[in-house]
């Protein structure tokens, strides 16, 4: 399906003026609503919005002068009219959905603009995968802007990806119609150390006049942070405390504070506004990562805005953080983010600004959802076989591939263990004393085994280590080809035989997530596109995901959204300890650590 560009403001300026002055009837009028003006932070009773060619022509107390016999009139019945919500930083792949199905899931929640970084698929399929995401995004009835991924691999030398992104790739993508900027610059040590490749990507983006996304995942706010800011990233979503948000805003960055499926970073940072009284224009709300279950059962940006309000934020300020602040940051203030002339007519009708029920959604002047039901089509891209055949394993794996041999003569070992932290992206670098039986190190008690299975180049490689915090019991294993960011395969388990079964199952189905217990598969989420996404409806994927999480609980795991923790165990740019296809990585020093530290 061909993408038809949305008409620009200059293309339709004459028609907008004709409607605004009453010389031509509007195509649509939204009548009698309370106008929530995010430019002035005020609510103005009894206003009408006149729309033509998908853009707002005027917002006036009475638009009857530009209402004709063929004008569609949408009665607000006195409800609030607020701008469509914007997600400033997100990864569509984290929803396990393609852009079309993600759009279908979030439109009823009032999200009409998304700023997406498809670096997950970039690691698997390179620039071609980014182009596929970009092209399906442009087909949607809402605004999906694409940030060109910056870091594949996320930490050069620490992991191997299916493809690498180069400065030439970034420069090429800056000419694509839906590219809004550079995706999160995760290689923060590279920027702080003036790595030529990272600076070349930033320069290509700035030369194109577009926004550079940030990702400073370190608590160090000293010279390293100063160097990162000097390098050009314009925002950051990795803050976890008030001091992080304040430091970023003081240095001219936008603090993006996130509420995803597993990231709860709003309450700890929004106090910079609600208690310290800082200017809220430089704080922006986002989700980062939301899986399909959250989207179907809890919401999207409406969930984030409600949460910000529950944290003490004024509703109008919270709405600014999810509309005009985002638009301004990306240079789109004249295009989206407010209900004012010339902007795209992205409008939500709601009866309450605090609980924010999303009762009627209009995108580009057309009704797209009423009372939670979508009313438009979300077209699919024709994904080729090359995107559906990405689990490349040289052979079936066996239990012996998942056994860790102890040093000769050892009765016990001190092992370096990845420690999972509930509801946070960082992990802990821990050490445990583990027993040795018949020459093999045993995972016992709260410690499980983790393996990284190479799946891009069919090398047959398996890296084994240990992880704690999941609470698994009995003989079980869980495997996933969603393994941020290199997206090999992560297998966590208590038993080598079950780990082999789980890994081979994902090879057979072409990617996804599976849980085995006592040799029997309890749950499977098929993700055939790049091993990351399904083109099935969100409700179907959410149901399979819920069954998967039920299976995790049946194996003893009680962590909130433990699947998200599982999928991040190979993310070698967030401290402290991670696993990659090259070994165990200490992200504090960007050095490899031995799995076995000492033995007796």
Image (spheres, rainbow, N blue to C red):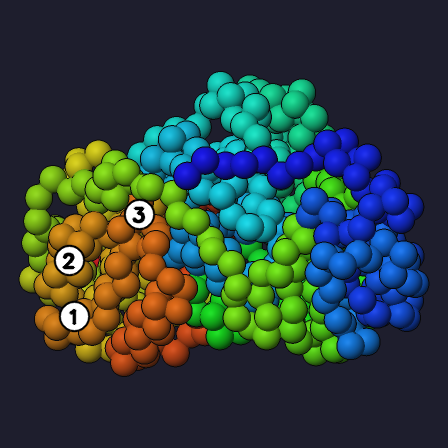
User: Residue 167, can we see it?
Assistant: no
Q: Which residue is mark 1?
A: 521
Give the farthest residue toward the front.
69
**Residue 557, relative to residue 367: is it above or below?**
below
Spatial separation of the CA atoms under disc 1 and disc 2: 9 Å
Q: Tag 2, which secondary structure? A: helix
Q: Which residue is mark 3?
A: 529
Q: Tag 3, which secondary structure? A: loop
In the rendered structure, which disc, 3 or 2, sits on the residue that comes first in sequence?
2
**Residue 396 in picture, x, y percent from top left:** 8, 49
State the residue at coordinates (43%, 49%). Answer: 379
Of marks 3 and 2, the one in the foreground: 3
* Image quarter in which the N terminus is found: top left
User: Residue 18, can we see it?
Assistant: yes
Of marks 3 and 1, the one in the foreground: 3
The label shown at residue 62 is none
* Image quarter in which the C terminus is found: bottom left
Spatial separation of the CA atoms under disc 3 and disc 1: 22 Å
In the rendered structure, which disc, 3 or 1, sits on the residue that comes first in sequence?
1
**Residue 306, relative to residue 152: is it above or below?**
below
Tell me where residue 440 sits by quadrant: bottom left
Q: Which residue is mark 2?
A: 505
**Residue 539 in picture, x, y percent from top left:** 39, 69
Asked if marks 1 and 2 touch (Cβ < 8 Å), the reply is yes
Spatial separation of the CA atoms under disc 3 and disc 2: 16 Å
State the residue at coordinates (26%, 59%). Answer: 526
């Amino acid at each position: 399906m061909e993408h038809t560009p949305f008409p620009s403001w200059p293309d339709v300026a004459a028609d907008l003026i004709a409607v605004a002055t009453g010389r031509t009837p509007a195509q649509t009028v939204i009548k009698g609503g309370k106008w929530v003006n995010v430019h002035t932070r005020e609510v103005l009773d009894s206003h009408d919005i006149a729309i033509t060619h998908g853009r707002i022509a005027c917002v006036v107390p009475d638009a009857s002068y530009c209402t004709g016999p063929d004008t569609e009139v949408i009665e607000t019945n006195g409800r609030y009219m607020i701008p469509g919500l914007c997600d400033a930083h997100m990864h569509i792949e984290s929803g396990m959905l393609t852009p079309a199905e993600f759009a279908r899931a979030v439109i009823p929640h009032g999200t009409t603009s998304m700023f997406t970084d498809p670096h997950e698929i970039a690691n698997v399929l390179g620039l071609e995968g980014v182009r596929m995401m970009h092209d399906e995004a442009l087909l949607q009835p809402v605004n999906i802007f694409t940030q060109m991924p910056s870091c594949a691999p996320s930490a050069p030398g620490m992991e191997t990806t299916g493809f690498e992104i180069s400065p030439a790739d970034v420069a090429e993508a800056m000419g694509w119609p839906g590219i809004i900027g550079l995706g999160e610059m995760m290689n923060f040590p590279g920027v702080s150390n003036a790595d030529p490749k990272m600076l070349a990507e930033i320069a290509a983006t700035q030369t194109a006049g577009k926004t550079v996304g940030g990702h400073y995942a370190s608590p160090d706010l000293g010279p390293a942070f100063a160097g990162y800011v000097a390098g050009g990233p314009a925002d950051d979503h990795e803050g976890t405390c008030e001091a992080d948000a304040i430091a970023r805003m003081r240095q001219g960055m936008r603090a993006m504070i996130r509420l995803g499926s597993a990231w709860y970073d709003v309450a700890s940072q929004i106090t910079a506004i609600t208690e310290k009284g800082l200017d809220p224009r430089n704080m922006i709300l986002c989700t980062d990562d939301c899986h399909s279950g959250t989207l179907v059962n809890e919401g999207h940006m409406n969930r984030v805005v409600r949460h910000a309000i529950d944290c003490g934020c004024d509703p109008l300020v919270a709405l600014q953080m999810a509309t005009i602040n985002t638009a301004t940051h990306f240079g789109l203030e004249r295009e989206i983010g407010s209900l004012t002339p010339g902007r795209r007519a992205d409008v939500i009708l709601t009866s309450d600004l605090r609980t924010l029920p999303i009762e009627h959604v209009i995108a580009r002047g057309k009704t797209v959802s009423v009372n939670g039901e979508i009313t438009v089509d979300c077209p699919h891209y024709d994904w080729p076989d090359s995107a559906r055949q990405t689990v490349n394993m040289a052979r079936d794996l066996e239990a012996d591939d998942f056994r860790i041999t102890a040093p000769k003569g050892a009765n016990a070992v001190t092992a370096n263990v990845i420690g999972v932290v509930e509801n946070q992206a960082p992990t802990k670098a821990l050490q445990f004393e583990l027993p040795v039986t018949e020459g093999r190190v045993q995972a016992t008690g709260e410690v499980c085994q983790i393996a990284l299975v190479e799946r891009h180049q069919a090398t047959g490689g398996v890296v084994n280590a240990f992880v704690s915090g999941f609470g698994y019991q009995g003989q079980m294993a869980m495997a996933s080809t969603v393994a941020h960011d290199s997206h090999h395969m992560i297998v966590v388990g208590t038993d080598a035989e079950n780990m082999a079964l789980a890994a081979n199952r994902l090879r057979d189905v072409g990617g996804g997530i599976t849980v085995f217990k006592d040799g029997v598969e309890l749950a499977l989420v098929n993700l055939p596109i790049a091993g990351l996404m399904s083109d099935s409806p969100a409700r179907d994927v959410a149901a399979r995901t819920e069954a998967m999480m039920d299976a995790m609980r049946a194996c003893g795991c009680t962590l909130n959204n433990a699947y998200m923790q599982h999928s991040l165990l190979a993310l070698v740019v967030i401290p402290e300890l991670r696993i990659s296809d090259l070994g165990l990585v200490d992200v504090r020093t960007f050095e490899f650590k031995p799995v076995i530290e000492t033995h007796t």
